Image (tube, rainbow, N blue to C red):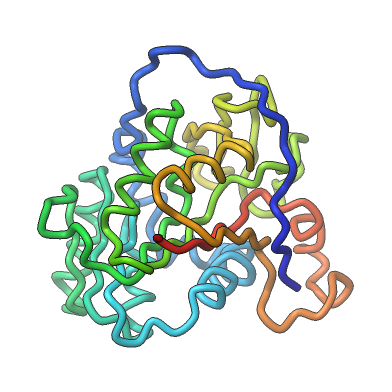
Amino acid sequence: MDTTSTPGEGLTTNEKDGARPAAAGSQFDKLAGVYDGESMAQWPFRRELEVPSVLHRLGDVSGLDVIDFGCGPGFYARQLKARGGGRVVGYDESEGMLRHARDREETERRGIEFTSELSSSLQGQFDVVLSVYVLPYANTRDALRAMCVSMAGLLRPGGRLLTLQLHPRYESEPDYYHSCGFSLTSEAHHVDGSAVRLGLLKDEAMVTGWYWSAATLNATLRAAGFEALHWYDLWPPGLACLEDAPEALRPYLRRPHAVMIDCQKE
């Protein structure tokens, strides 16, 4: 079951004027072990819901040039290459994360490039940009706009962006997602520009993201040159209805914390 309607949201804001864009990479430099792609991918929530949903929505990437924007330790980049991607590049600002990804590549020799810089040689070179949990780390509208413009600049005309974003209607009860291995807390839920803390329960780690409404995300993506925006809830491929889902996943499916946005460069 796909949900393609855009979540309706107000335009209240909690932004601080003049705030500098967050150096999101610095949050993750010491968390490469925690974010090890293969171990986190085995969390039931990710293994049974997030990863299948993203890869199903992405579809056939055979021969396509794809960049994993905010690749972390490289889990999705490796998935893209394994599924026949042509040129596959992983980009991340966190040197700690990239060190982990490069170490894996040095051992496995899959042919994936990893970089911490979006050089001019990458501009307009890709058919697809995949961006998993990246836009939530923009702490100002300017930072959000810059991220979207950067992604658009990497694509060829007609290229595609698939991004996984904090759901505008995530459940504000802090313990709601504990069964999935994490918590979400905020002093101002569902307010543009408000900080949202993601707690990784197993590893007792915490990272901070920022909330952006559906209206703000749609407007920013369109201003960056994207069109044909479609929103999709995470949903296991082949699952006909909520009652057929594993019982442990049903609360999440009722109120997901993340949503996919699929759009095309003009």
Q: Nearer the viewer, residue 230 or 87?
A: 230
Rendered residue at 17%/74% (across/down): 107
State how many labels appear: 0
Rendered residue at 63%/39% (across/down): 215
Residue 119 in the image, given as x and y percentages of width and height: 12, 51
Given the current orientation, which residue lies at the most extreme top position? Answer: 17
Residue 209 in the image, given as x and y percentages of width and height: 50, 34
Rendered residue at 32%/71% (across/down): 127
Vertical placement of 182 versus 211: above or below?
below
Q: Nearer the viewer, residue 23 or 221?
A: 221
Residue 140 in the image, given as x and y percentages of width and height: 44, 26
Vertical placement of 90 versus 118: above or below?
below
Quarter occupied by the N terminus: bottom right
Q: Nearer the viewer, residue 7 or 227?
A: 227
Name the image quarter holding residue 223.
top left
Q: Image check: 154 left or right of 137?
A: left
